[in-house]
Amino acid sequence: MTKNIINIGLPSKGRLKHDTINIFKEKKLNIYSERGERDLFGYIKKLPNVKIIYLHARECIEQLSLGNIDIGFSGYDLLKESEFNIQKDRSEEHTSELQSLAYLVCRLLLEKKKPQKKNTL
């Protein structure tokens, strides 16, 4: 009997990585890595059939759309900017579902430079 491995893509750095890991910690699912913080792979002791793969947040979307990971965490803004469409089903076996996790606040500040008065003679 073979185990079905579930590949989960997590952001590899930054606040998105730490906040995503905290979601797992809140559920008592600690993620371990053999080589520490900079490792590209991790695991959850309680779930031996789960493999954690650390990717760039944008790459999580790409790998999810290609079917290389089963679950991916990334920013909604990156999803909207992405050329990959994970919302379209590739087959009957594959379904995509977006889940909004309200654990980050993103603010955008736009600054417009005031036009300078032109000196005329």
Image: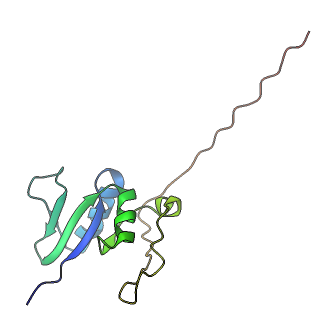
Residue furthest toward the right? 121
- Residue drawn at 92 percent across, 9 percent down: 121
How far from the left and from the top, in percent, is residue 67? 33, 73
How far from the left and from the top, in percent, is residue 96? 42, 80
Kindly indicate the quadrant of the structure image that contains residue 60. Answer: bottom left
How far from the left and from the top, in percent, is residue 42? 16, 63
Task: Give the mark count.
Answer: 0
- Residue drawn at 21 percent across, 66 percent down: 52
Q: Where 21 sits versus 48, above or below? A: above
Q: Is 111 on the left or on the right of 72, as rendered? A: right
Kindly indicate the quadrant of the structure image that contains residue 23. Answer: bottom left
Residue furthest toward the top? 121
- Residue drawn at 38 percent across, 63 percent down: 62
Kindly indicate the quadrant of the structure image that contains residue 95. Answer: bottom left
In the image, 30 versus 37, the foreground residue is 37
In the image, 103 versus 9, the foreground residue is 9
**Which quarter shows the N terminus?**
bottom left
- Residue drawn at 33 percent across, 50 percent down: 14
Q: Where 45 sits versus 13, above or below? A: below
Q: Is 62 on the left or on the right of 85, as rendered? A: left
In the image, 60 versus 114, the foreground residue is 60
Colour option used: rainbow
